[in-house]
Image: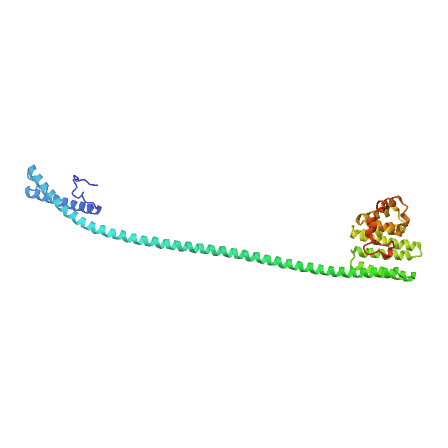
Amino acid sequence: MTTPNDPRPYAHCASPIVRYRASLAFGFLACLICADADAVRASQGGARADGRIEVADRSPEHDSQILKDYQDALNGQAQILAAQADREYKHLDDFLNRVIWGLGILGGAAVGVFAWFLGSTRREIQKSIRQHLDAQVQQAIEQKTSSLHQELRSTQAQLTQEHDRFKDALQLLERVNEVIQEGERILIEGEGATSPALRLQQYELAERTFRKAVQLDERHAVAYVGLGKALKRIGKEMTSDHERRRVLQLAIDATSQAISFNPTYDRAFYNRACYKALIGRPAPEVVADLKQAIGLFELNAVFAGLDPDFVGVRSDPAFAALMSNHRERPDLVKGSGQESSTATRSDLQAE
């Protein structure tokens, strides 16, 4: 920063380059002034013996005038150099302004290109991420769909197997029921036979028929009850007491099997009570089974009151007490609608 009173003749120049060139010019002029001063001294003085120049005496006013003239010359030269430097600096300044303007344009264009590239890259990245996520979602959907299809096929296969098993079981049940009905028909024919030999023959045929039903379905309670009925009738046809008791015990075992497969089957309890009474088991055992049968189906009390199989236990107090509880029940007798004969009982009734 310069001031108007700055003694340097080039100090008012704004450009550093101009000030530098002006300082060089000023130094060069100073050298010239010194050379001129030496020449003046040589012309005004004589040379000494040692070769030095002897300067004649001068007045101070004369020296001041010489310095002033040189200073004016230097100032004029400095002003010329400063004007020239200002012109050159102006050209340089214009050039720099154009360079800065051009760089600004290039910078703006570069920023625009970068922004465009950045935006395009961002869109590409977003697109790539979206495509990646879509691919993952699609893959997850396909995997889940494939898993569901496999589960569905497995479930369909299981349902098909269950349907086939149910169909086979239904067919087997129908077949077993047909065999049981055949055995019941044979029993009825045997009870209608007049010859003991013919009756025994029919009962043994019924036994084989019911055993066939048991072989078809070894857990069919009705088949075991039918087998017990056939064995009981065979035992009653036996002349040997030992054989009769043996066959009746087989009938008890058959009804016990039926109870193990169906504990709520009242006919099995009723029939076992009959067989126990016929074989001479203790009355409490007979009453216990009969009580179970009546508890499951109350009409069994009516059947027991009329059934000749219980003749051997009718005098027992427990049996009498059980029967007395249902003796004054005309609604039960009316509801049964059956005769006392065991040969005429329907399938709804016990043995």
Give left or right: position of 343 versus 104: right
Give the image location of residue 203, x and y in percent. Answer: 87, 60
Q: Is residue 335 left or right of residue 141?
A: right
Q: Quadrant of residue 222?
A: bottom right
Return the residue nearer the eye: 76 or 187.
187
- Asked if residue 49 shows in the view, the reply is no
Q: Is residue 216 left or right of residue 199?
A: left
**Residue 193 coordinates in the image, percent (x, y):** 90, 61
Which corner quadrant holds the C terminus? Answer: bottom right
Is residue 36 at least partly visible in the picture? yes
Q: How many marks?
A: 0
Name the residue rendered at 34%, 54% in the picture. 112
Left of 121 or right of it: where is 1? left
Q: Nearer the viewer, residue 128 or 335?
A: 335
**Residue in the image at 62% along x and 58% along y:** 152
Residue 12 spot, x, y in % from top left: 18, 43
**Rendering quarter of residue 230:** bottom right
Q: Nearer the viewer, residue 199 or 115?
A: 199
Q: Colour scheme of this structure image?
A: rainbow
Residue 284, by quadrant, is: top right
Seen from the viewer's position, the closer of residues 110 and 293 is 293
Residue lying at the far top in this picture: please name it: 60
Quarter of the image with the N terminus is top left
